[in-house]
Image (cartoon, helix red, strand yellow):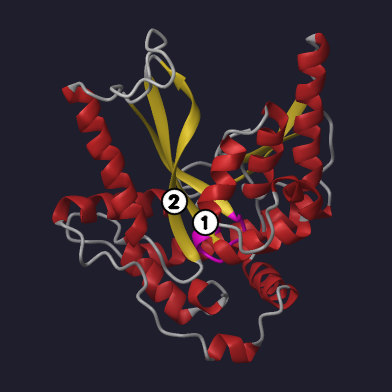
Amino acid sequence: MQHTVWRWGLSVGIAFLLAGCAALGIRSSDVSDAPSRACFPVASLDSTDRALADTLVRNALNHEALYTVAGGLKPVSTVIHERLPLARPDSVPHGTYDVVTADAERAALDRAGQLNRVAEALTCGALTAVVVPFASTQNQERAMQVLFVHEQRLKASLSEHAAFWGQWGFTPGADPGVVITTIEHAARNDRHRGYGVLFGYPKHAVSFFVEADRRAQANGDFVERDFFHIPTHKAETNRFTYAIPDGYAPARVDSSLYHSATAILREYRSRRPNYRSADGTLQGIELLRDWFREDPTVDPRRNN
């Protein structure tokens, strides 16, 4: 259930986000008095790191992470993941000290360092980027995922789903990197449910996926399913997508999510043509800074 899909419309989407702020106890006085802090402080990065920062933000905007960075409709979204030759070979015993020693491995470690360095600069108020290694490895490679987290929406999720998150002692305010890493290393269906909640899928869809997987693991039966897709700028399907029972009729929660997401997408597409460099490259960081300044409903500095 990775990198899944969802949808909604502009006035409804803004109302949804404002209602979310009200539900979180965010007052208009909190918004107007919000401290001014650097939004995406990338100026200190060298040219190579800045280029990577620009690439990550463009990728986020063009795919499902748009729904995290622009208002936190999704608490968490993956931006990229890339495989690096950093995994311990099976022939090397656990606990061995000298694991990452070859030149290729050291170069991969430098790349991991760059991902962490750039992620640290991709912060704006409640919006932050984190790097979390995958638990599983393949062919002596480990995938590193870069994710955007809307910390205020994550806090709301930890509160709303306390019956699930409480088993690890997670409460609102838990460190996002710790939460995601714990879920990445959790038992199979805890991982499925945890990522489903983090990625903003409806509870009914997450529960269906978990129960279908339990059935498949128990007796090998594949549970027939359909998929609910929410479009992104680059793809209409298979990015913000979740499994639903075969023949399921979308309910109000699905429609609400769809219309909220598509409202955000329309607004992004209306702004996008104004942020092109001479070579046609999207200036994503500048787009987001201006969007946040002009629209308090999506500004992560006004939601914390």
Q: Residues within 10 Å of mark 1 (few under 14, many from 20)?
A: many
Q: Which mark is residue 15?
A: none
Classify residue 214 as left or right of residue 298: right
Residue 105 x, y percent position in the rendering:
24, 25
The one nearer the camera, 88 or 61, is 88
Quadrant showing the C terminus: bottom right
Q: Amino acid at mark 1?
A: Val
Mark drawn on residue 149: 1
At x 53% / y 79%, what residue is drawn? 302
Q: Which residue is mark 2?
A: 130
Distance from Cα at disc 1 to Cα at disc 2: 7 Å
Residue 100, visible in the rendered structure? yes
Of helix, strand and loop, which mostly describes the magenta segment?
Answer: loop
In this rendering, the answer to whether 47 lies above or below 11 is above
Q: Please, what is the three-letter code of the amino acid marked with disc 2?
A: Val
Magenta stretch: give its range. 68-75
